[in-house]
Amino acid sequence: ASRSLSTFHDHILTSRRTLALLGAGLSAPSGIPTFRGAGGVWRTHDVLQLATPAGFAADPALVWAFELERRSLVRAARPNAAHVALAKLAEKNNHFLALTMNVDDLSERAGHAEDHLFRLHGSIFSTKCTVCDAHVAEDCADGGVRKLFEHDLSKPLTLADVPRCLEPDCDGLLRPGVVWFSESLPQPMMKEIFEWINDPNDSAIDTMLVIGTSALVYPATAYIEAARRKGARVAVVNVEKEDPSLLGLEEQDWYFEGDAAELVPRMLEAVVGGDG
Ligand code: NAD
Ligand code: APR
C-alpha cells in the first residue's frame, strides 16, 4: 500500500463515490478513549459486563454507571478537525456516505449532514426499554443536556436508581440504546446501506476511507469488503505502524500512519479546501 498523500489527492479529486467507515480512533483526539488500541476501554473494563445484554441483565446499575461516565466524556468532548473535514466532504460530495461505529455525537456536532451519516451502533444518548423496546429519549445532535437520566457519579448508582419505562403499564428497565456485542445492527439501516453500496443507477464506489478503527468488529467491517468488491481503493488512517486490521491492503490502496485529526484534513483538503 502507498503512503503518498499526493497520489491519494489525485485519486480523491476524481472520486465519484466515497464510503467511509469511522471508528473510535476518529474521536480519540477529542478525548474519548478507544476500545482496543492503547488506553482502550476493553483493556481495563470487562466488555462482557458492560457491552452485552447478559451483562446488563446481571448488573444494570454497573452498565449505567459506565454509560453515564461515557456520556459525560462525550459532552465534554469537542469535534476535532477530522470530524469537520468529513462534514465538509459530505457538503461538497453528494455521493459520500459515512458509516460510524462511534456512539458519540461529534460528527453531528461538526455539522456532518444526517443524510450522509449512518450510525451503525446507535447513539449513546438514546435509551430504550428492555421490555417494550420503546425509545424513551431520542439522541439530539445539539450537544445539549439530556433530560432523561442524570446521576451524580460521585455517588454509587444502585438498581433503585436505574430508570424504568414511562409507557403505560410497562415497567421495564431502561437500557442504553446502543448496539451491544452479539446484537445485530438494525435491519432497515443495513438494507439502506446495502442499497447505497449496490445502487445500479450510480457509479460504483471508487474510494473506501477506513478511519481510526481496528476493523475487527463485524458486521461493520464487512462494508469494507463490500466496497472492495465494487473496485474501491481503500485508504486507511491509523496510529499503528501497520494496518491493524486482518483485511490486508493491496498495491492500489493507501495506508496513512498517524493521528486522524491531523491526517484526515490533509487528505481531504484537495476537495474541501485547506482550512481543515
Ligand atoms: P459478533 O461477534 O456477535 O459478530 C457480529 C456478527 O458478525 C455475527 O453475525 C458474526 O457471525 C459476524 N462475524 C463475526 N466475525 C466475523 C468475521 N470474521 N467475518 C464475517 N462475519 C463475522 O458481534 P460483536 O463484534 O460481538 O458485536 C456486535 C455489534 O455490537 C458490533 O457491531 C459491535 O461493534 C457492537 N458493539 C457496540 C458497543 C457499544 O458500546 N456501542 C459495544 C460492544 C459491541
Ligand atoms: N488517529 C487514528 N487512529 C487512532 C487514533 C488516532 N488519533 N487513536 C487510536 N487509533 C486507532 C487505534 O490504533 C485502533 O486501531 O483506532 C483504532 C480504534 O479501534 P477500536 O478501539 O477497536 O475501536 P473500533 O474499531 O471503533 O471498535 C469497533 O467495537 O467495542 C465495539 O461498538 C464498539 O464501535 C466499537 C466497535
Image (tube, helix red, strand yellow):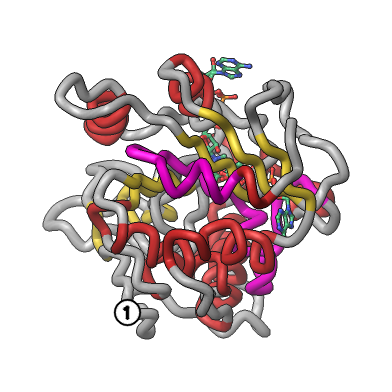
- Residue 45: x and y in percent read 77, 52
Q: Is residue 232 left or right of residue 255?
A: left
Residue 235 or residue 176, whichever sits in front:
235
**Quadrant for the N terminus in the image:** top right
Residue 77 visible in the snapshot: yes
Tell me the SS state at disc 1.
loop
Q: Looking at the rendering, which quadrant does residue 69 occupy? A: bottom right
Magenta stretch holds residue 20: yes
Q: Is residue 182 visible?
A: no
Q: Is residue 61 left or right of residue 193?
A: right
Query: Bounds of the magenta span?
Result: 8-37
* Label 1 near ligand 1 (CB < 8 Å): no
Q: Position of residue 53 (x, y in %)?
A: 51, 37
Name which residue lies at 35% across and 72% down: 111
Q: Which residue is mark 1?
A: 142
Q: Is residue 210 left or right of residue 200?
A: right
